[in-house]
Image (cartoon, helix red, strand yellow):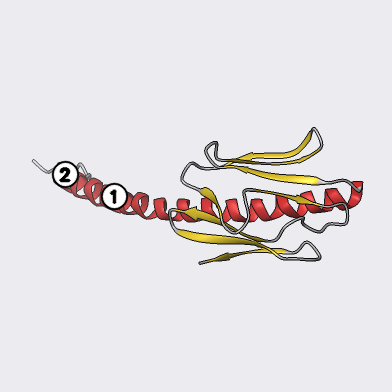
Amino acid sequence: MQNTQNGFTLIESLIVLSIFLIISSITVFSIKPQYQSTTNKSFISQLKADLYYGQAYAIANQTEVKVLFIENEHTYIISSGAKRIVERNHSEKITVGQGTIPLYFKFNPNGNVDRFGSLFIRTPLGDYRLTLLIGKGRFYVVEE
């Protein structure tokens, strides 16, 4: 009797499935560090955009804009008077700590800051420093 069925044996199917599982598990383990790196970079870029927005709001409305970092709640608030312009929560793995200035500063109606110095941002993948410069209200964030 001649066997006319063409197909895979059980052994061949198990080998292919095991190879597929090995390749997919390698992919999953390599994505996790990418996710953390993306989370850190998105927090820094969002913080910079929010600070620029707060500064522009102060200039456009000729009012003081306050920036407050709440360390234990993992959030920061940008407000003008009683009106909250921006309120952002961030990952518990990211901490903003006091440096040469406290976790509070203001943008004056001309866009300048009321104090100058540094704040420290600690993430699982690296530390950053937010530096506020005297005059002109400039600031920058650098990785340490």
Q: Residue furthest top?
A: 82
The spot of residue 60 in percent (x, y) is 90, 50
Under circle 2, the secondary element is: loop
Q: Nearer the viewer, mark 1 or mark 2?
A: 1
Under circle 1, the secondary element is: helix
User: As shown in the figure, which amino acid type bears the numbered disc 2?
Assistant: Thr
Q: Residue furthest left?
A: 1
Left or right of residue 25, residue 69 in this image: right
Quarter location, residue 112: bottom right
Residue at the image point whose x is 37% and y is 55% from the top: 30
User: As shown in the figure, which amino acid type bears the numbered disc 1?
Assistant: Phe
Q: CA distance from mark 1 to mark 2?
A: 17 Å
Q: Which residue is mark 1?
A: 20
Disc nearer the start of the sequence (1/2):
2
Q: Which residue is mark 2?
A: 9
Residue at the image point whose x is 54% and y is 51% from the top: 97
The spot of residue 127 in percent (x, y) is 49, 60
Left or right of residue 3, residue 30 in this image: right
Number of residues whose C-alpha sits closer than 10 Å to that of mark 2, classed few (under 14), some (14–19) or many (20 or more): few
Q: Quadrant of the N terminus?
A: top left
Residue at the image point whose x is 45% and y is 55% from the top: 34
